[in-house]
């Protein structure tokens, strides 16, 4: 069974890079370009993991989307990885407060992305047994 991954990122080049990276694994990849459509897709496709950009244009930034996912009783077990170019401690703390399970600072390597996703999926499998 493929793990479902949702990439919520406003930069098409970054979405493409992530998709190309994950296409090598056993992943079903979906994409959204902003927080509102990303949140809608989380409810529709029920991903195992969400790769979520922090700074996006529009109504909802990544922290707000993460908080809404984690506060939802049906979606709360979804793993969320925050993606950001800002790796300061304050940003990491804000991600933790929003309920993020992990943080990747851009630019990240494809290997780093795969390792983070696989580690979180393993953790999720252990926690839901």
Image: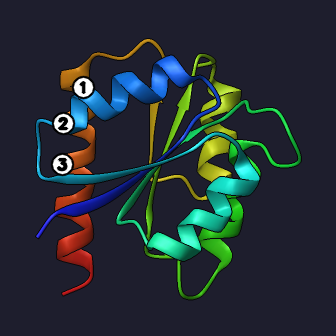
Query: Which color mode does the image show?
Result: rainbow
Q: Give how far across and how far down residue 35 sits, in percent.
A: 72, 49
- Residue wearing tag 3: 118
- Residue wearing tag 2: 115
Determine the secondary structure under disc 3: helix
Q: Residue at x 26, y 45 (%)?
A: 117
Residue 127 showing in the rendered view: yes
User: Where does the N terminus fall, quadrant-wise?
Assistant: bottom left
- Residue wearing tag 1: 112
Q: Give how far across and how far down residue 26 sits, in percent.
A: 12, 52
Q: Is residue 126 above or below residue 89?
A: below
Say if mark 2 contacts mark 3, CB within 8 Å.
Answer: yes
Determine the secondary structure under disc 1: helix
Q: Is residue 62 above or below residue 104?
A: below
Q: Residue at x 58, y 35 (%)?
A: 9
Considering depth in this image, is 89 or 1 the residue closer to the camera? Answer: 1
Left or right, residue 121 beside residue 62: left
Say if mark 2 contacts mark 1, CB within 8 Å.
Answer: yes
Residue 109: quarter of image = top left
The total number of labels drawn is: 3
Dot 2 crowding, Cα within 10 Å, few <14, some 14–19, many 20+: few
Considering depth in this image, is 118 or 22 the residue closer to the camera? Answer: 22
């Amino acid at each position: 069974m493929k793990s479902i991954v949702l990439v919520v990122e406003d930069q098409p080049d970054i979405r493409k890079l992530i998709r190309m990276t994950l296409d090598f694994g056993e992943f079903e990849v979906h994409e959204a370009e902003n927080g509102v459509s990303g949140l809608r897709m989380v409810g529709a496709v029920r991903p195992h993991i969400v790769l979520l950009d922090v700074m996006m244009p529009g109504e909802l930034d990544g922290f707000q989307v993460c908080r809404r996912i984690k506060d939802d009783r049906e979606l709360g077990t979804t793993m969320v990885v925050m993606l950001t170019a800002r790796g300061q401690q304050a940003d990491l703390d804000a991600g933790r407060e929003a309920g993020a399970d992990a943080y990747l600072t851009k630019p990240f390597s494809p290997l780093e992305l795969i390792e983070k996703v696989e580690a979180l999926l393993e953790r999720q499998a252990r926690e839901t047994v």
